[in-house]
Image (tube, coloured by chain):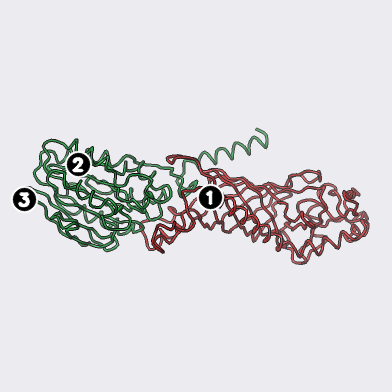
Chain colours: A red, B green
Amino acid sequence: MRMKRSIFSGCVWFAALCAVHSLAARPCGTGEVAALRSVPADTAVAACPAGPDGAPGVADSTWSGRCAPGVGGAVGLSGPHDGAPGVLCPSVGAGGAVPGLSAYPVPGRRPLDRRIHRGYASWERVAPTHLRLQYAGSIGIASAGMGWDYGRRGQWETELLVGVVPAYHSDKAKITLTLRETFVPWSIACGGRLSVEPLACGFYFSTLLSDRFWVRQPERYPKGYYFFSTRLRSYVFLGPRVTCRVNDRRSDRMLRAVTFCCECSTCDLYVLSRWNNRTLRTRDMLSLSFGVKFQLFDSRREACAVHGTR
Amino acid sequence: MNGPNAIFATVAAVLLFAGGCDLVEYHPYDTRITGRTGINAANARRIDEACAGRRSIRFALVSDTQRWYDHTRDAVASINSLEGIDFVIHCGDLSDFGATKEFLWQRDILEGLRVPYVCLLGNHDCLGTGEEVFAEVFGPPDFAFTAGPVRFVCLNTNAMEFDYSRPVPDFGFIGRELEHFPSGVGRTVFAMHVQPGEFQFNNNVGRVFEWYLNQFPGLECCLFGHGHHMAALDLFGDGVMWYAVSSIEKRQYLVFTVDEQGHAYETVDF
């Protein structure tokens, strides 16, 4: 019975996550994507300014998602996979990233911030945009999961992770399920492929999939005897990240970028324990974690770069 | 070393370094323990040796120190400043949530005591994986030790936390203690976290429990915590005194003296 309840609560979490993500992505997906789908390919390409050598501009399908002017004449269009006209094309020649940004100022964009949100149509909106692996962080020795980027500059991330806590001195290992929300306010481009995100912050909720832990105290206790949950933990975190963009000349590559994260977090129990206690040091309540985020993009999908105008 | 290998080596080095760092935690209930373990057994031996042949002993009784780390530290300093204390009994509830780190924080503070100490299992200590951490750091929830002329029997009485799935209190343990009572020891003191009559106790066996306790030679008194207040009462009306010690938040603890005339106690404010 308890196991069924665990599975049910897991499903509710996932459904809520999908709903939140779907709502967050809706303006982009139903607006700009649909509009670009409806126009012929050459019209979409013509929306980008011409390059310095007269080559037509392209809507670049790289992770940076910029609208770059044609450089060196290397222009191509992605083939429509479901009969709709293609609106994307492979990347331009070498060194096209930064000139594209400077040549085509996008409203609301920051000069060094290359992040951009990709919108997907229909059911593809719920497809994850990245995978994540994490070491420690109070949600298991190792955890893995998928996530979704959204927001005008892709500055919001929602992730669902599954972690493993080794048994150590308890009777068996435990599984955790974590729902994570991250806000990355700044991204600073450093050179051609590197960018630094000096501060990523957010919160996450983690539950233990074990019958020994409870969200609300069992009925055998008097009302309000234990005010807290042993099963559900809430955390806050912050830390820097470094993103390395994978060489964008191969636009059919699944992996677009790799982000290395180091985070410092604390949980509700430790904040309560530290409260009014000078004996405990601040570092006693902190926990470090190390993560890797793999930014994905499937070029077979019809997708478009949405230039921060929504 | 090429690029991917360098990245792999760097990540491996960082994780190896981080794994040994106390800033890395796998889960609040991960039961990953660093530092001293098996404390009750080791300290019981120290108490036994230190009090061997003595006709009188003096010990401090504290309880319910959960989340009051400053108060616990001050209590340790206060006990250290007293003369003639042989050992300290902690009547349980070292942790509030049963989280692993809570036990380690409390242990590290109690390690500051100049005299040996033993800890009992409280109801809060049973939450989550608390019982496993307690068993590793301090020892089994039922144990006994001898201090001079007195046998101390420390019991787990938190029946509600085990939902009657285990015998709490464990009459098997009590029976074995009675059967193998040390020769040359004439008196007995019982210590527990929850007293009979409280809802956490298995009150179905309250009277049986009382009967068993009275079978022990020279039952001197019974000690407990849990209620967060001081009390001295004849719980069953059988002439045996039951003493409750308050939570450490009240900045009080008890000091007991047991000698040939009987026992006496005093309240210490700090």
Using the numbered discs, state the Cα–Cα distance from disc 1 to disc 2 in whole angstroms. Answer: 48 Å
In the rendered structure, which amino acid carries the disc numbered 2?
Answer: Ile
B231 vs B222: above or below:
below
For residue A1, which numbered disc appears in the image?
Answer: 1
Spot occupied by residue A206 in the image (x, y as percentages of width and height): 54, 53
Can you identify the residue that label 2 sits on?
Answer: B47
Q: Dividing the picture into quarters, in which one does residue B5 lie?
A: top right
Q: Is residue A137 visible?
A: no
Tag 1 subunit: A
Spot occupied by residue B44 in the image (x, y as percentages of width and height): 23, 40
In the rendered structure, which amino acid carries the disc numbered 1?
Answer: Met
Tag 3 subunit: B
Q: Residue at x 71, y 63 (%)?
A: A23
Q: Is residue A49 left or right of residue B148?
A: right
Q: Dividing the picture into quarters, in which one does residue A45 lie?
A: bottom right
**Badge 3 element:** loop
Spot occupied by residue B208 in the image (x, y as percentages of width and height): 23, 49
Tag 2 subunit: B
Work out whether residue A74 or residue A280 is closer to the camera in this orientation and state it. A280
Spot occupied by residue B17 in the image (x, y as percentages of width and height): 50, 40
